Image: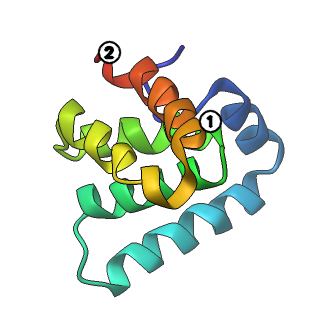
Amino acid sequence: MNDTPYPEWYHTVKREYTEVMKALESLGAVIRKQGPLDEKTANLIQLAAAAAIRSEGAVHSHAKRALAEGATPEEVTHAIILLISTIGFPNMSAALSWAKDVTGID
């Protein structure tokens, strides 16, 4: 696994579809600048959304990004545990196991 918040396939797509990925990254940057949320909070919210749609790659990515922005492993874990009543225990458990790949918490 690489040290970036993105999986290897992302870098391949970015090389092959440079303009598309530039537009996507630009959109993300603009959206983040438009609101009052800090980067850590934004990534914890996106982590929760990733868990809700059962996207293992996005859970990994947003957990890494949240940690890079100062979230603790316990905050990442708590953000996912908060989802139990919203997405159900099995979905929360899956997301928690994916986040633990990044946080190292057992």
Kindly state the secondary structure of the residue where label 1 is placed.
Answer: helix
Residue 14, by quadrant, is top right
Q: Which residue is mark 1?
A: 57
In the image, 7 versus 48, the foreground residue is: 48
Q: CA distance from mark 1 to mark 2?
A: 16 Å
Locate the N terminus by quadrant: top right
Residue 78, by quadrant, is top left
Q: Which residue is mark 2?
A: 104
Q: Crowdedness of circle 2 by 10 Å Cα count: few (<14), some, many (20+)?
A: few
Kindly state the secondary structure of the residue where label 2 is placed.
Answer: loop
Residue at 59% in and 41% down:
91
Residue 87, by quadrant, is bottom right
**43 left or right of 41 in image:** right
Q: Crowdedness of circle 1 by 10 Å Cα count: few (<14), some, many (20+)?
A: some
In the rendered structure, which amino acid carries the disc numbered 1?
Answer: Gly
Q: Position of residue 2 (x, y in %)?
A: 51, 18
